[in-house]
Image (spheres, helix red, strand yellow):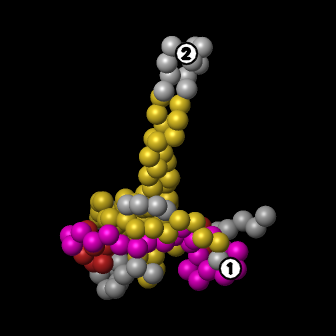
Amino acid sequence: MAEVSGTNIVLKNQSVQVEDLTANSMSIDKTIIDVTNKSSNGWREKISGVKNWTMSATAMFDPAATEGLQQIFDDFTNDPAVTVSMGPPTPVAGDIVYSGTAIVASIEKTADFDAAAEYSFTLEGTGELTQTVTP
């Protein structure tokens, strides 16, 4: 098995890499529905419910970045659903890329006294998240 450095996994918005990323993550979950009843013999019974996914990222703030905070802010204020993906910057055979349509749910900008200015944002998936292995 080949391990992958986190520096080789990026977040893309409309197929363009978000600039100056320092961290990015993806979360996938589903609702678990309790269907326990009197015939369950004292054991909880559950079924799968609705699936959900989010992607989030943190980046250094660069006012000159064309695919930075300004683009994310525009996507937030204009309310478009955007196509996003997470995977290697230039996938090669065998690489896995996750992609889907999402809406920018939140943005946070920080400017601490003794640190570089950063921003972070969260994307809420709308519809299916796909996993593709690059041929």
Quarter of the view holding residue 12: bottom left
Range shown magenta: 77-98
Q: Position of residue 68 (x, y in %)?
A: 35, 78
Residue at position x 27%, y 77% from top?
Answer: 70
Q: CA distance from mark 1 to mark 2?
A: 49 Å
Characterize the local packing of mark 1: few (<14), some (14-19) or many (20 or more) Cα atoms within 10 angstroms: few
Q: Answer left or right for 23 relative to 119.
A: right
Q: Which mark is residue 39?
A: 2
* Comparing labels 1 and 2, the label whose residue is closer to the camera: 2
Tag 1 and tag 2, C-beta contact below 8 Å: no
Quadrant showing the C terminus? bottom right
Residue at position x 79%, y 64% from top?
Answer: 1
* Residue 50 magenta-highlighted: no
Residue at position x 24%, y 75% from top?
Answer: 74
Q: Is residue 120 visible?
A: no
Residue at position x 31%, y 73% from top?
Answer: 72
Q: Position of residue 132 (x, y in %)?
A: 60, 70
Q: Which mark is residue 135?
A: 1
Helix or strand or loop: what does disc 1 sit on?
Answer: loop
Quarter of the view holding residue 105: bottom left
* Residue 80 magenta-highlighted: yes
Q: Earlier in the sequence, mark 1 or mark 2?
A: 2
Q: Residue furthest front?
A: 39
Helix or strand or loop: what does disc 2 sit on?
Answer: loop
Q: Amino acid at mark 2?
A: Ser
Q: Position of residue 29 (x, y in %)?
A: 49, 48
**Figure check: 91 above or below 99:** below
Q: Answer left or right for 34 relative to 105.
A: right
Q: Amino acid at mark 1?
A: Pro
Towards the viewer: 83 or 8? 83
